[in-house]
Image: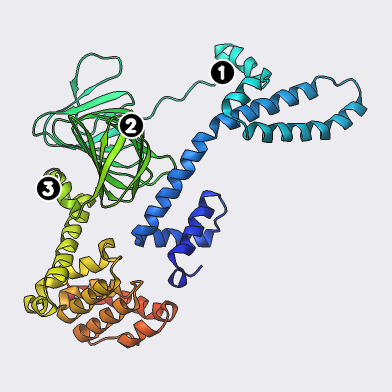
Amino acid sequence: MSERNASCEDFWTLISARLDGELAPGDRQALEAHLAACAACRSVDEAFRLQDSGLRRAFVPRRKAAAAVGEGVAAAVEAPRRRAAWRAWLAPAAAAAAGFLVAWALFRSPEQAARQAAPPKVAQVERAPRELRAQPAAPADAARLTFVTGKVEMLLPGSADWVPVPTGGSIEPGTRVRTGPEVLCELRGADGSDLWLNERTEVAFRQARSFDLARGQMGTRVERREAPFLVSAAGATIAAVGTRFDVETGPSGAVLTVIEGLTQVTGTGGAFLVRAGERATIVEGAVREKELVWNLLQATRWLNVLLARRPDAHPELARRVDGILALLGEAKMQELAEEEILELGESCVSPLLSYVQSSLSRPNRKLREKAAEIAGRLAVRQHVHELILLLADESAAVREHAAGALRRLTGEDQGRAPRDWRQEPWDANRPAFDRWLAWWKEHAKEYSSGP
């Protein structure tokens, strides 16, 4: 599939095919590339994964009951082996009977199927000597403490004493971790996810990708995996596949803020979806209300204190800075007339380019293209690299504005006029884009600083 000519609906079909294990290698690459650039389709992907995971868990009892029925039929068929003629006749009959019974069990309630199944082999396994059973593998660490602003304590399974956690120390499943006043910390999950704990927070690490938030506030950046990432709070379970969200508990419940992606909240009130840009109040296991959050960075600003105190630059800090610039760009476009923006000059270019590159701009195509046009008119030499990257944008208008600015700033066009980037398909422009990338490698120092 050509990504440039495909719609989001085409990629939804590929998302479904991947869940079914029917995705071709070439389509897999196209899908991953599209998901990396399209926040809307990432949300659809996460919704599909959550739904698939829920269905698989729901059918576990049916599969077990069906397997027990099939094993019972097979055992009954294998018992009478007196004559070869009987074996020849019974083989297809047994297969048909087992298939019928498996299908019959799948479409009945799990309770009925489990009660009426005949599982002799299961019973034999349960009665087998302990030394013959497969021993469970030792549990892997649930997380590791990577950065802290003060003393963090943990309560090990079976212990009654809280002990300090050293930086770099591991957190095994079943451990409780707490922070004190003015103490924040960062942990890296066994799956590569980031977890941030605010002051006066206590979390129980049940296992990798499964946590109980007893009190306080927890921020997450969840790595995309098949198994959902689970956080329990206020009587409900928050499930995500790959996303960023924040949970804060209080006397009356919990508040969930989703920064990116999609989450599902399941509890006594049923299951609710909470999407990026939404804040949900959870009380006694149910979502009582949802609201849109205009400034997600403001809603999670407590993280800035932790990230700013790190000795090295964390990728999350870079994302937050870009987000602030993008919000600044959006505010300028919505609140100021075009002439007023032009009067502000080149100081507007970086936030406007960040706005164009962010998912925040995708719903408003005209505003996004106008931002690209103004940024192109005001850009100076230090913006050349960002403009080159915009030549690969999905919007033909954005590509044209970027190409026009590059010609003005460098005197180069790599054999493609600005109007060609709008009128010609991406495949025709790709060679010129590759030439721009090669050109940048040779001239980066000339354009990296100063107007």
Which color mode does the image show?
A: rainbow
Where the C terminus falls, by quadrant?
A: bottom left
Give the percent coordinates (x, y) of residue 211.
Answer: 31, 31
The label on residue 142 is 2
Calculate the distance from the C-alpha at mark 1 to the C-alpha at mark 3. Answer: 51 Å
The reply to whether the C-beta atoms of the residues labelled 1 and 3 are less than 8 Å apart is: no
The label on residue 308 is 3
Relative depth, front residue between 315 and 95: 95
Q: In the image, what residue occupies the spot 25% across and 62% down?
A: 360
Q: Earlier in the sequence, mark 2 or mark 3?
A: 2
Per the image, label 3 sits on a secondary structure element best described as helix
Give the percent coordinates (x, y) of residue 21.
Answer: 56, 50
The label on residue 133 is 1
Q: Quadrant of residue 282?
A: top left
Query: Is residue 208 at all visible to an observer of this figure?
Result: no
Q: Earlier in the sequence, mark 2 or mark 1?
A: 1
Per the image, label 2 sits on a secondary structure element best described as loop
Q: Amino acid at mark 3?
A: Ala
| Circle 3 Cα neighbour tier, 10 Å, few/some/many (<14 / 14–19 / ≥20) | few
Relative depth, front residue between 439 and 114: 114
Q: Amino acid at mark 2?
A: Ala
The reply to whether the C-beta atoms of the residues labelled 2 and 1 are less than 8 Å apart is: no
The answer to whether residue 404 is above or below residue 100 is below
Relative depth, front residue between 51 and 358: 51
Q: In the image, what residue occupies the spot 51% across and 34% down?
A: 58
| Circle 1 Cα neighbour tier, 10 Å, few/some/many (<14 / 14–19 / ≥20) | few
Calculate the distance from the C-alpha at mark 2 to the C-alpha at mark 1. Answer: 26 Å
Q: Earlier in the sequence, mark 1 or mark 3?
A: 1
